[in-house]
Image (cartoon, rainbow, N blue to C red):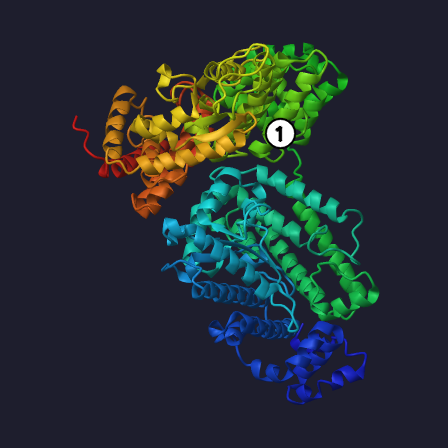
Amino acid sequence: MSFSDRITRLPLPADPARGADLAGLFSACPDRLRDLIAGAAGSSPYLAGLLRSEADWLVAALEHDDVVARETAGLATLEPEDLGVALRRAKRRVALQAALADLGGVWPLERVTGALSDLADRAVDLALRAHVATEIRRGKLPETRADAGGIFALAMGKGGARELNYSSDIDLIVLFDETAYAEADQMEARAALIRATRRMAGTLSDVTGHGYVFRVDLRLRPDASVTPVCISTAAALAYYEAEGRTWERAAFIKARAAAGDIAAGERFLRELRPFVWRKHLDFAAIQDAHDMRLRIRDHKGLGGRLEVAGHNLKLGRGGIREIEFFTQTRQLIAGGRDRDLQCHDTVGGLTALAAKGWVPADVAEELTAHYREHRDIEHRIQMVNDAQTHSLPKDPEGLRVVAALSGAADPQAWCAHLKARLARVHDLTERFFAPQAASAPLPELSAQSRDIIAGWQAYPALRSDRARQIFRRIEAPLLSRMAGAGHPEEALARFDRFLSGLPAGVQLFSLFEANPQLIDLLVDICGTAPALAAYLARHPAVLDAVLAGSFFAPWPGEPGLRDDLARVLERALTQPGGGYERALDAARRWAHEWQFRIGVHHLRGLIGADEAAVHYADLAGACVAALMPVTAEDFARRHGPPPGRGAVVLGMGSLGARVLNAGSDLDLIVVYDAAGVEASDGPRPLAARPYYARLTQAMVTALSAPTAEGRLYEVDMRLRPSGRQGPVATSLDSFRSYQLTEAWTWEHLALTRARVVARCGGASDALADEIEALRIDVLRQRGGDGRVMPDVAQMRARLFAAKPADGPLDARRGPGRLQDIDLLAQACALRTGDPARSTLAQLRAGRRGGLLSADAAERLSSAWRALWRLHAATRLLTERPLDMEEIGHGGQAFLLREVGVTDADQLSQEVARHVADARALIEADMPATGD
């Protein structure tokens, strides 16, 4: 439709007096613009108000191309109060010109949203800098050379994608680069930058006599309920590495450094890239997005029959969010392997997905057209009253106005067209989130396989007619997939053992039929991972977790796991016939289900090695934390409550660093403080030292002793002071004295990873805080010792002489491999006195402390990530040294996918390259051992 045609179809003001107010403006404008202004004033009270206030400006402004640059020029010198007024004026003018250019068809969608987004970026930048400058003038912000004091704002959501609406909030995450300040100044800088962030939000959001600029939402930051509005990049990275969730990954697809220290913001996003973009195909994103769609519909009451009147164009069926979910979910699935898919905006994402074959080109083109039309209509809805709404009017007159603003002469035809488009969008996207299973022909079977299959009809799971009917529908794809395993006969034998142990089959077979990908999951276990298949054979009850429906629910994190296990233990202790032994059995059943879930999720590519490491650590931490008080209570019934302040359990090594794998044991230390109390008070009192020693032994037994349900973990206490010669539980005073005066360098290195994972006793919370403070104090006192690096060099030489690499694909042992990088990272944390525990965070500490160059830290981090993926995958497949022939084709495919290579030769080359690079970097600064 032409500009003039669009204008003539706009409704004129019902009240001639409204147009008369604009007579002066009309006389100065061309005819087409005059008609446009009259129509806009009649359709939108919001635009009418803008026209009245900015009439003189409008005529002069229409010839300029960059409305944002023009309206914000010279504002950088203003004080915050004057800046707020000026930005509100700029918002009125930019919104007015964008609206008129939009309604007249002069600007395309991207230019309209781009102008609004550019204004938001500029407004945030000006406000941040103004309030940072105020903090500097007040002497509250320490000296730094960083741009804008090192603070930056990440534009999220529509702002990050440069897709803002007329009435959008702006979603921001505000962080600061802590390395821009001396360590002693960081807390003061943090406080000042928090104030600047709050005042920036007020400058933009507060409604004054001049209106507002943008509503600012800061709730997308990490753990927003407990963190301040501005946190350090180190804190944010630590959160995302340990606790980041799928929806946060999706949010960062659109993240963009928009204001403040842009360079620091872009560095942060580069460091966060492994969190957002996974190397594996992330099928969990599909279920997460689908569940979110359904939750939104249920929460907003958006289900039911599709009608245009009152329809939510953003969240409703066939709306904008469905296209965004469709696009972002596919980006998450494959974007880690292909950076071309890592687009911020929805249209760009669809275009890239089509170019790479992830979405049919015609579907991408159609969804793009629907998306543009949806956004155009959304803009017109919000133009009417500057309302933050996405719902179409419910009344005919309201729909007529929106239709007219969209250039439609017939509102009924416009509504019918929109309804058809909404239904089409829903149909296109629903196919992806709810795919249909494809049938497969029966494969050719050996005589041995046919004999095994013939015996299935006698199994309990296939006794009922219904079970046999459902199983027949999944039998062909199951057997076809089984035939493609590395060792088909072995895979079928493992599946046979699994099937024979099922008490019933209807629920499980129905689950497979409704979720065909679960057939691949089960076959992968049997055909790919002998260790996991054996685990399933030993613990068939873990399938209860699959049948319960929560097997693919979002990961609950360590606190959620701990609370869940505490409830399980409470039930086992209090139910009829229950007690401590029953509680230990219940803990094992519960943990086995979660261990199985983690292994399966890793095998199927639902999580990567980095997530699996955290999940295994969360599970182990929850087991220790939940069992410790139960064990202490059982112990107290005989010997009385813990004397003094109680005890804490320190997770050391991989548990402390939160990087466990499927075969990890637990390194633990117990520290107690009797606080001068000589003995316990109970039926059989014990002196403080033997009390805590025996309590520790009871805790180790609770974790490691085999029961009817198996064992939880192997426990290693050798990292305690004096190792095997020392007591199993150490008093706080002894621990402090030993660490400051007697401990070897290797013990200080181990302390860099220490983390409180459990506690018992009345004052154990305070004790935990004190031990953490002591840990940092020891690192900072002992890290400056000149013997650290010579000792590390000698340890390194002895370690690799005693335990060399077990072949070229050993990711853990040997120079340049995981142990080597871990050792250097711990030395960095010790020498800088940094509290970081994980290898990647410790390498960043080395970079911040000047011990590693940025390039060296990044290359070592890259090598560690690649080797960890190989190591974690290997431990899931086999407990023996990696043998590519032994693990079969299925295991090889999993391993290659995890590492991100195409064949075994490339795997060997990649491992050799990373090992050589890491070894060269480590040995470049390593002192000679003198050997």
Q: Residues within 10 Å of mark 1 (few under 14, many from 20)?
A: some
Residue at point 44%, 50% (across, down): 187
| Direction left: furthest residue | 930
Position of 512 compared to 302: left or right? left
Q: Quadrant of residue 202?
A: bottom right
Looking at the picture, tell me which residue is in the foreground, 297 or 245.
245
Q: Is residue 338 visible?
A: no
Residue 328 x %, y % = 57, 48
The amino acid on which the numbered mark 1 sits, given as a three-letter code, is Asp
Point out the image quarter for the C terminus: top left
The residue labelled by disc 1 is: 563
Seen in the picture, residue 420 relative to 792 is either above or below; the reply is: below
Q: Quadrant of the N terminus?
A: bottom right
Number of numbered callouts drawn: 1
Say if 451 sits above or below 623 in the image: above
Q: Position of residue 44 (x, y in %)?
A: 73, 72
* Residue 495: x %, y % from top left: 58, 17
